[in-house]
Image (cartoon, helix red, strand yellow):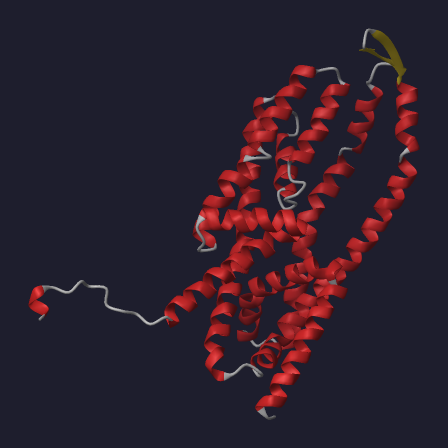
Amino acid sequence: MAASTRTVVAGVVAVLAVLAAVVLAELFGTVLFAITVAFVLTPVQGWLLARGWRRRRASIATATMATLAVLAIVAPLALVAYERRQAFIAFVESFPETFELTRFGVDVAISRAELVDAVLSYLPPLVVDAAVFLSAASIKLALFGILVFGLLLGHERARSAIVAPIPPDYVPFVEALEDRSRQTLVAILILQVGTAVGAFLLALPFFWLLGFDYVLVLATVAGVLQFLPIIGPIVLIVALVGLELLAGDLQMAVVLLAGGGIILGWLPDVIVRPRLATYTTGLSSSLYFIGFIGGLTSLGMIGVIAGPLIVALLVEGVEQLAAEMPHTDATPATADDG
């Protein structure tokens, strides 16, 4: 293929890639997460291949492992909700028959039956929304598994197809970006797990000191919720605050909101995450935090991966550019230099 033809084809492919990104924007998070997991699990696939597994079988086994790992992250939340359903019902039944509130000097009495009816009136749309969400989530989970399998099975051919149109002089630069992307994506996933563990370890003494039952369960939920950066453990804190307010314990609700907001909602992302980032991503804490916050506010949950990745690629590009710049001897001349 002539150079001019190759340039035209590369331009058309670039335009089609942009159009695909626009059309498939809703799946961007799933695709990026699948790429991240595939990068992480490539050594696992290589370990299976080294022991005589065929590539297809090794890819299927590795993709299945990845899908089960995602389910394992979500499963504790569903398990806790199922296991504690009777305790929640008993808690609601323990409410007084009438709640008496004073607003603007006027006493207002609300019966428990009225409160339950008001809550039940919102259930039908919530059930529909939950059904739609679960349906979409199951489809995305299946897509995630297929993508991981496809990436593991054909990543070498895909890489060759991407690199083929690139002029030889630019291949080292592309390979440098590829290596930085792989290192950063692996580091971000490890970092996310480390932050979740940090949230779990912070939650254990916090809930124990406040005298909660099921401290291990609550700490586990807090750690799992850390995988949802927009929501995070603060959802657990808000739910517990609501229960304490319904039980009439205003002091505990205030302690939970203030202490939980700082210890579980703030410390893992502001203290634990940047410190781990320095050792895992190779970025300074400030650069990682810029990527993390910027990606989070711009792209939502997937920005936790995309933001630091873009910053890391920018740093790599600057380093490559600096390496290409001519170096001059900055040593000042002396009289003896003549």
Relative vertical location of residue 106 with respect to residue 272 in this rendering, above or below? above
Quarter holding the C terminus is: bottom left
Identified at 76% across, 33% down, the residue is 84
Question: Taking the image as drawn, is residue 60 in sight?
Answer: no
Whether residue 66 sits left or right of residue 183 in the image: it is: right
The x, y position of residue 310, in whole percent, is: 55, 59
Q: Is residue 136 visible?
A: yes
Image coords of residue 184 (percent x, y): 51, 59
Image quadrant for the N terminus?
bottom right
Say if 310 sits above or below 221 in the image. Answer: below
| Residue nearer the viewer, 181 or 187 | 181
Closer to us: 257 or 41: 257
Q: x%, y% of residue 213?
A: 66, 26
Q: Quadrant of residue 264?
A: top right
* Quarter of the image where one finds residue 76: top right
Q: Nearer the viewer, residue 122 or 116?
A: 122
Query: In the picture shown, does residue 63 fall above or below 88?
Result: below
Give me the residue at 91% from left, 27% from top.
118
Q: Tag count in the figure?
A: 0
Q: Residue furthest left?
A: 336
| Residue 129 relative to residue 273: left or right | right
